[in-house]
């Protein structure tokens, strides 16, 4: 089968792009021919990247980016002619953004099945103007068209009430969360040290101020921040950084990423918001003590004190206490490994195969 994935980004560190990349690799292993359409912008750094690339047998085609004036996160890129030329057997598009509805229109004209992966863009705090624009867009574009997709792929159970409010037919919804590739279960473990790790995009939504505050309270413990950075935010958090925090460049190689996670005893995700945090389940698969802010995505994955720990968003004192109490280890790591197995991509991809 010829499968096309459409995503705003195909470079950089991004949960949406990571999902697209990993499921595309799984499709390719099963013998499907996979292509990816995206903008030519790298997530977080905003660098312009090559118009074409290849990962294994997957062809990536990138199109010139145009940003909408009302939101820096919503991208506009023209791929309509290329979609018609490619003529895939199936399209999987990601996010409730304009590119998904462009693809929907073309697929319906060509009688191509199209699935939408929502990525839980709900419960987001926006400024007044952007909130008004979002509501208007939902009224004129999302609600009238969302049931035209052949299937709606939900990545988290917490988003189901929001999909219901959009009027999505229940029978169209299929739950397929983000997954973990095989290497996270098979790679030999590296030596562990009593260190604390944040791994992900270095951006305001990740609320690294809380992570840094905890580090200042625990100066004898080494903390690491690793990821691609939004320049202004990186400059902001570097102004008053304690000596026990090291900021490192992003890691793209999966083996090196696993090794980095293995080297740390505790993994922390202090975000203001998470839909279904990929890196959290990756850390769990490696048996880490995981600590997450009480986001919708965090509390769906973590059962507090069973397979990890939760703290109130922005509460650095709670985070400090949890790190201090658990830096020498506990039994939640074993539960985390067992819990993470349900996110194994090799099994999750079978849900797609059933739909195909």
Image (cartoon, rainbow, N blue to C red):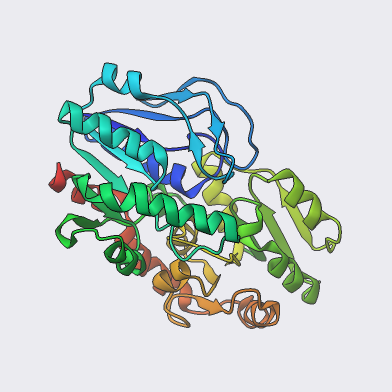
Task: Out of 139 and 57, give the one closest to the viewer.
Answer: 139
Left/right of residue 352 with respect to residue 162 in the rendered view = left
Does residue 139 sit above or below 323 in this rendering? above
Left/right of residue 330 with respect to residue 167 in the rendered view = right
Q: Which quadrant holds the C terminus?
A: top left
Query: Residue 241, image x and y in percent?
Result: 83, 60
Given the current orientation, which residue lies at the most extreme top position?
85
Left/right of residue 3 with respect to residue 94 in the rendered view = left
Q: Which quadrant holds the N terminus?
A: top left
Task: Out of 207 and 31, give the one closest to the viewer.
Answer: 207
Left/right of residue 177 with respect to residue 249 in the rendered view = left
Whether residue 90 can be seen here: yes
Whether residue 89 can be seen here: no
Does residue 76 sit above or below 161 in this rendering? above
Residue at position x 59%, y 44% from top? 72
Residue at position x 60%, y 55% from top? 199
Task: Out of 114 and 352, give the one closest to the viewer.
Answer: 114
Q: Quadrant of residue 209?
A: bottom right
Q: How many labels were placed on the picture?
A: 0
Does residue 323 sit above or below 246 in this rendering? below
Query: Residue 139, image x and y in percent?
Result: 36, 54
Query: Residue 318, image x and y in percent?
Result: 65, 82
Task: Out of 5 and 343, give the one closest to the viewer.
Answer: 5
Query: Residue 211, image x and y in percent?
Result: 69, 67
């Amino acid at each position: 089968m010829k499968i096309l994935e459409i995503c705003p980004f195909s470079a950089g560190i991004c949960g949406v792009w990571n999902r697209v990349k990993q499921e595309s690799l799984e499709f390719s292993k099963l013998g499907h021919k996979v292509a990816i359409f995206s903008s030519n912008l790298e997530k977080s750094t905003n660098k312009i990247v090559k118009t074409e690339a290849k990962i294994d047998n997957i062809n990536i085609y990138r199109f010139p980016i145009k940003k909408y004036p009302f939101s820096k996160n919503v991208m506009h890129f023209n791929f309509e002619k290329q979609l018609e030329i490619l003529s895939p057997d199936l399209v999987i598009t990601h996010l409730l953004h304009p590119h998904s509805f462009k693809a929907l229109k073309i697929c319906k004209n060509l009688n191509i099945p199209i699935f939408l992966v929502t990525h839980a863009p709900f419960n987001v705090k926006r400024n007044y103007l952007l909130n008004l624009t979002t509501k208007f867009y939902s009224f004129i574009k999302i609600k009238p068209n969302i049931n035209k997709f052949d299937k709606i792929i939900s990545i988290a159970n917490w988003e189901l009430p929001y999909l219901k409010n959009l009027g999505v037919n229940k029978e169209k919804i299929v739950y397929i969360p983000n997954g973990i590739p095989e290497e996270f279960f098979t790679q030999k473990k590296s030596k562990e040290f009593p260190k604390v790790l944040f791994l992900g995009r270095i951006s305001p939504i990740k609320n690294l101020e809380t992570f840094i505050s905890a580090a200042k309270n625990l100066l004898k413990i080494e903390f690491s921040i690793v990821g691609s950075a939004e320049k202004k935010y990186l400059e902001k958090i570097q102004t008053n950084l304690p000596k026990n925090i090291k900021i490192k460049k992003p890691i793209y190689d999966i083996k090196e990423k696993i090794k980095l996670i293995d080297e740390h005893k505790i993994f922390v995700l202090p975000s203001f918001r998470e839909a279904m945090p990929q890196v959290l389940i990756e850390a769990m698969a490696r048996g880490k003590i995981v600590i997450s802010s009480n986001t919708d995505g965090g509390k769906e994955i973590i059962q507090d004190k069973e397979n990890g720990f939760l703290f109130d968003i922005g509460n650095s004192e709670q985070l400090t206490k949890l790190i201090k109490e658990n830096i020498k280890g506990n039994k939640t790591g074993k539960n985390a490994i067992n819990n993470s197995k349900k996110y194994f991509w090799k099994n999750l991809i079978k849900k797609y195969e059933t739909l195909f």
